[in-house]
Amino acid sequence: MSAFIDVHDAGVVFPTRKGPFVALRDIELKIDKGEFVTLIGHSGCGKSTLLNLIAGLLKPTSGALICDGREIASPGPERAVVFQNHSLLPWLSCFDNVYLAVERVFGASESKARLKARTTAALELVNMGHAAAKRPHEVSGGMKQRVGIARALAMEPKVLLMDEPFGALDALTRAKLQDELLKIVARTHSTVVMVTHDVDEAVLLSDRIVMMTNGPAATIGEILRVDLARPRDRVALAEDPVYVHARKAVIDFLYTRHAHPEPQAA
């Protein structure tokens, strides 16, 4: 059976004033439908660049990307992106921020009542129905991210792409949203590709962890399968030998075998 997402021999080269800059090279990655995959590595390793390739926000210099049997040549509603910055429009309510995306995708084929129902359902899915009428400045950072996730899910995407969505949040809010994301993915059976710097986040959430080598000319160094049953409980996993082993393997890759070089003093 062919992969749901297939990244074949992809490379990205950016032109600069000093000449070509090779950001990514020789990327081979296959992702199954319903799989949760995280991309992890040091700053500058091309994690977000790879995510942007899958989103269609960036075109590869070489190679090809396929999603559900079709080449990824541009952004599309079947691939929704959640950024670290929630990117909500400040003059619209939480409801209207989600409704805007729903209308864009389904407006030509569905009634306004159905569009509103979709929007309400998406907000309820992330436990934000109570704040539908509030504007972004009236809710917390974690609540803003919930709305951003609701907006993405309301489009019923085939793939949910997340670029460090919890990176700017405090530790407790981050943990709570990680747990919520686990529940949402269990209900929606979404295919998820997520960029993170957090080893514990990667192990808790992932079916597989894609570990990137340092840039420039970064590539996939190793892929680790996380054989932990779902649903997952962070407290129970703290002493689980599979969890501990996976965490140690990622730390070893990042900080022993591919330690980020220290900047040289001037």
Image: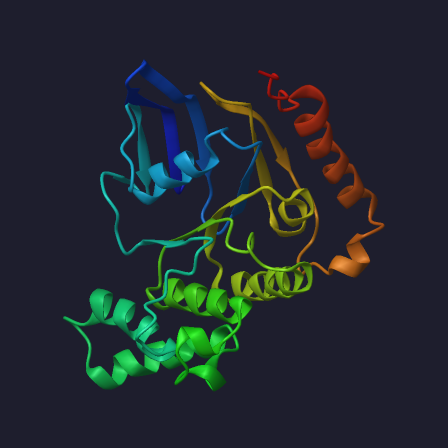
- From the viewer's side, name the closer residue of 115 and 31: 115
Q: Residue at x 37, y 67 (%)?
A: 151
Residue 33 coordinates in the image, percent (x, y): 45, 48
State which quarter of the image contains the C terminus: top right
One can see residue 68 in this view: no
Residue 57 coordinates in the image, percent (x, y): 29, 42
Image position of 64 with respect to 188: above or below? above
Choose top left, top right, bottom left or bottom right for residue 254.
Answer: top right
Residue 214 coordinates in the image, percent (x, y): 54, 23
Going by the picture, which residue comes out furthest to the left? Answer: 108
Going by the picture, which residue comes out furthest to the top? Answer: 19
- Left or right of 201 on screen, residue 10: left
- From the viewer's side, name the closer residue of 5 and 259: 259
Q: Residue at x 67, y 42 (%)?
A: 199
Choose top left, top right, bottom left or bottom right for residue 49.
Answer: top left
- From the viewer's side, name the closer residue of 74 and 86: 86
Residue 255 coordinates in the image, percent (x, y): 70, 27
Image position of 36 with respect to 186: above or below? above
Image position of 82 with respect to 266: above or below? below
One can see residue 156 in this view: yes
Q: Residue at x 32, y 64 (%)?
A: 155
